[in-house]
């Protein structure tokens, strides 16, 4: 089977190198590793990235199931990349003050 090059390989390589340097992951790290696993699952190439994702998982003492469960909980708590959970959602328009009936 021929290995394919992934168009996001170089960006993902940087992310994975950052993750490998972390002894204890934060929310962003958990979410990033979970999404990278999804991106490369079944992908016929980037074997070095896939091996390094497994190394990060082992370094953190997690399984794929625990990683996925943790990522799901983080998203359900309202985490969004680049935004703190205290940021408000929506337009800021207060519908209770409107005169529309």
Image: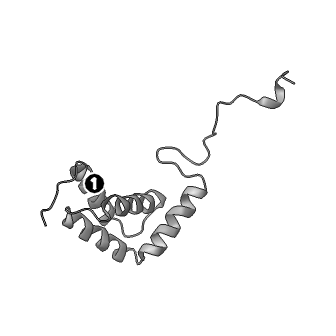
Label 1 secondary element: helix
Q: Where is residue 67 in the image (x, y as percent from the top left)?
A: 45, 70
Query: Residue at horizontal 35%, vertical 64%?
Result: 37
Q: Can residue 21 be seen in this view?
A: no
Quadrant (top left/top right/bottom left/bottom right) for the N terminus: bottom left
How many badges with numbers are in the image?
1
Q: Can residue 5 be spotted in the picture?
A: yes
Q: Where is residue 27 in the image (x, y as percent from the top left)?
A: 48, 59
Residue 53 % position (x, y): 30, 67
Q: In which quarter of the image is residue 22?
A: bottom left
Q: In this view, does 88 lie above or below 98?
A: below
- The one nearer the camera, 38 or 54, is 38
Q: Seen in the image, is 76 located left or right of residue 97? A: left
Please give left or right for residue 19 compared with residue 85 in the image. Answer: left
Residue 64 left/right relative to 80: left
Going 19% across and 66% down the picture, which residue do you hit? 48
| Image location of residue 91, percent across then percent down | 64, 30
Q: Residue at x 44, y 63 (%)?
A: 30
Quick one: label 1, few (<14), some, or many (20+) residues within 10 Å?
A: some
Q: Mark 1 points at which residue?
A: 12
Q: Residue lying furthest front in this view?
A: 1
Q: Quadrant of the C terminus?
A: top right
């Amino acid at each position: 089977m021929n290995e394919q090059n992934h168009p996001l390989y170089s960006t993902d390589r940087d992310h994975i190198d950052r993750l490998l340097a972390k002894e204890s992951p934060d929310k962003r790290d958990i979410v990033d590793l979970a999404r990278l696993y999804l991106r490369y699952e079944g992908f016929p190439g980037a074997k070095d990235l896939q091996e390094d994702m497994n190394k990060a998982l082992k370094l953190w003492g997690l399984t794929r199931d625990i990683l996925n469960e943790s990522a799901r909980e983080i998203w359900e708590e309202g985490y969004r990349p680049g935004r703190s959970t205290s940021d408000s959602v929506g337009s800021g328009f207060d519908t209770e003050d409107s005169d529309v009936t």
